Amino acid sequence: MAEITKPRILLVDDDASLLKLLAIRIESKGYQVSTVESGLAALQQLKMQTFDAVITDLRMDEMDGMALHRQLQSRYPSMPVIMMTAHGSIPDAVEATKQGIFAFITKPVDKDELFDSLAKAIEIHGVHGDETPTQTNIVTRSGAMLHLLEQVKLLGPTHVNVLISGASGTGKELLAQAIHQHSHVSDGPFVAINCGAVPGELLESELFGHKKGAFTGAVKDHQGLFQQAQGGTLFLDEIGDMPLNLQVKLLRVLQEKTIRPVGFQEEIPIDVRIVSATHKNLPEAINNQLFREDLYYRLNVVNLKLPPLCERREDISLLAQHFASVIAKRMNQDEKRFANDAMHALVRYDWPGNIRQLQNVIEQVVALTPGNVIAVQLVESALNSNVSNAEPLSLNDAKKEFERDYLINTLKMAAGNVAEAAKLAKRNRSDFYKLIKKHNIIVENLI
């Protein structure tokens, strides 16, 4: 079994005797080594097997080391490449660094320097980095995540309810989307709602819909999310924040497979796959009478637990480079890469805010990097300034955020009619207008 977890190295050199000697040395350090004598042979080998790093000579016939590296960048962007050359020079090293080479080593090869570079490459990029068993939007090479994705493939064709648990920022909605993509309703809609972000008095209408005139401010019929998700998947994020009175109604929907919009007399049949998620400890909430035990067992037919980012460090470099590429493209900038010590700082950080915090940091460093290489000083500065992003909101900020969300949702319920929204909120119209102005809400954009 230990053999499976050994890092796999592809060694490329047109000097057969040196190739054999280096392979013996590298294998003595516990690596699995495959050898080829050309860049073209290396590309063929990579089609048949995954590797954790490539060590290649710079000067080779047909395809030199830099040409091979360019091919690897386009096909295997997370693959670390260590370049060797007997013709080492400062211009070669500078060019190699600009092109994103992980390390540049001159011949005759210093074995300690080589082993140090290999160890750092594996520490940063992880083991067996391209073995993703399923096509999803999830970027990973973590063993724990790959196991979760295998479970997703098995769950997809079934119709069982799935509960995803994990800390905030770990990617619960992406995992829910992966379940939808592998399900028999993948051609249908994927509809998501954060149950903790919608005031309790509005959540029922959001989920089940309402009839025109059902209550003050209901100026037209409103189709709820269950109907919008018909024939697809409804993702109930932060289900642990749902009020108890709505938990009763949700349980009935799950049992009867029908909904009754507010103000309607008749039941409407629904065919919807339910995936829910929470960062809370629901068994503890049940003991505290904050969550219904019968609903918990209805939702938790299968439980998938997402690990925090600090428990999947092998994904940090992969996610960081992925975010950097996406953000640079969005900003119309050339793609940027991380200096080795910058990536090392990212990998060593504990990420209390998980993937969401990592994305915020990468957004910051990409925006502030004038060249193509992101420096360690910039990463460390971003990490120091971003620590607060992982902390809970202050009470005042939380109140402001809730108030703004409440105003927006109330205005949506009233179809943009401020007077009706004010009645719904039990506030006079002038006070309501002041609140709208205070939060810079453009009513026309909500209709």
Image (cartoon, rainbow, N blue to C red):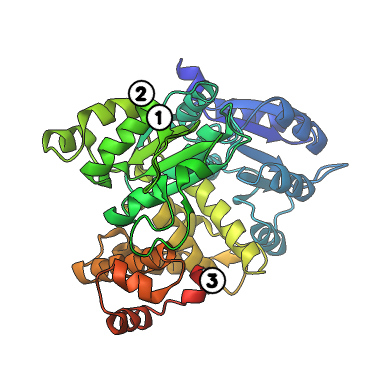
Q: Earlier in the sequence, mark 3 or mark 2?
A: 2
Judging from the image, what secondary structure is the residue with disc 1 in?
strand
Q: Measuring 20% from the left and 37% from the top, which residue is drawn there?
A: 291
Q: Amino acid at mark 1?
A: Val
Residues packed near mark 1 inside 10 Å, few (<14), some (14 to 19) or many (20 plus): many
Q: Is residue 295 above or below residue 81?
A: above
Residue at numbered disc 2 = 301
Q: How would you rate the neighbour count of disc 2 (Cα within 10 Å): few for under 14, some for 14-19, many for 20 or more? A: few
Contact between labelled residues 2 and 1, with CB atoms less than 8 Å apart: yes
Q: What amino acid is at disc 3?
A: Ala
Horizontal side, residue 366 vs residue 296: left or right: right
Q: Residue 132 at x, y = what percent?
A: 58, 32
Camera sees residue 196: yes
At a point 52% along the width and 41% down the height, the residue shown is 229
Q: Quadrant of residue 434?
A: bottom left
- Which residue is tagged 3? 367
Q: Amino acid at mark 2?
A: Val
Pick whichever of labels 3 and 1 is earlier in the sequence.
Answer: 1
The one nearer the camera, 335 or 152, is 152
Residue that sits furthest to the right in the current view:
62
**The quarter of the displayed image where residue 173 is located:** top left
Horizontal and vertical percent position of residue 62: 88, 42
Residue 315 visible (yes or no): no
Image coords of residue 384 (percent x, y):
33, 66
Provide residue 420's location: percent of width, then percent of height. Answer: 37, 71
Find the distance from the CA under tag 1 to the CA under tag 2.
Answer: 6 Å
Point out the frontmost of discs 3 and 1: 1
Residue identified by numbered label 1? 162
Distance from disc 3 to disc 1, alpha carbons, whole Å, reads 38 Å
Residue, x 34% and y 51% (percent of image)?
A: 203
Label ID, residue 14: none
